[in-house]
Amino acid sequence: MTPAPVPSDTPATSPRATPVDARKILTEVLKYTGLLAIAIAVIGGGLGYLFAGTDGLISALIGTILAVLFASITAASIIGAMRFDIAAFFGIVMGAWLLKIVVFIVILALLRDAPFVQTMVLFLTVIAGAVGTMLIDVIVVFKSKLGYASNVTLPKVTDETAP
């Protein structure tokens, strides 16, 4: 089997020289995450206020901020890391992930005994935000048209029926 011919008139480019469609996808994820934050804040805040008063409202807003902030950090770290090589990319994304976990644990430890926190409302809004952002990620990625390969040059079609 012979390798596919590579046209000599095409310039060799580095993989990062062409724009990546993933940036557009992640920007769309951030846009829908913002809309989700507004919906959770309004619905969760209203229900929190209805069932637990002002403490429920505050807890719902804190839960919304936590869920959306951490989902946004993931998308933002990927967008920022796309301009680096693969090792730096994974270092940045994994570093952001570890930072999120540490910050999340510290914030929950600080809020554990706070008198203005209604734990059930906080828990439910964080869960709603986590599930909502996962659904947003899945829907946006499934509807996107991100290619499986980039910077691919297909061989020219030859007419094999010509004499």
Image (cartoon, rainbow, N blue to C red):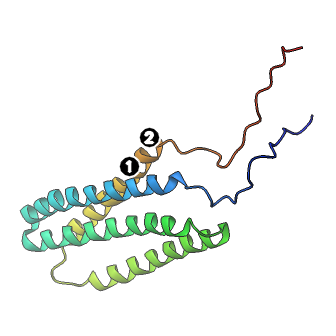
Which mark is nearer the camera, 2 or 1?
A: 2
| Label 2 close to label 1 by CB (< 8 Å) | no
User: In the rendered structure, which amino acid carries the disc numbered 1?
Assistant: Leu
Image location (x, y in percent) of residue 61: 20, 69
Q: Residue at x 19, y 67 (%)?
A: 60
SS type, badge 2: helix
Q: CA distance from mark 2 to mark 1?
A: 12 Å
User: Which residue in the protein does label 1 denote?
Assistant: 135
Q: Which mark is residue 106?
A: none
Circle 2 Cα neighbour tier, 10 Å, few/some/many (<14 / 14–19 / ≥20): few
Quadrant location of the C terminus in the rendered image? top right
Circle 1 Cα neighbour tier, 10 Å, few/some/many (<14 / 14–19 / ≥20): few
User: In the rendered structure, which amino acid carries the disc numbered 2?
Assistant: Lys
User: Which residue in the protein does label 2 denote?
Assistant: 143
Which of disc 1 and disc 2 is earlier in sequence?
Answer: 1
Image location (x, y in percent) of residue 156: 76, 32
Image location (x, y in percent) of residue 97: 50, 72
Residue 66 picture quarter: bottom left
Q: Is residue 136 above or below residue 55?
A: above
Quadrant location of the N terminus in the rendered image? top right
Q: Residue at x 36, y 56 (%)?
A: 133
Q: Residue at x 51, y 65 (%)?
A: 78
Q: Residue at x 8, y 73 (%)?
A: 54
SS type, badge 1: helix
Residue 161 picture quarter: top right
Q: Nearer the viewer, residue 29 or 51?
A: 29
Q: Is residue 98 above or below residue 38?
A: below
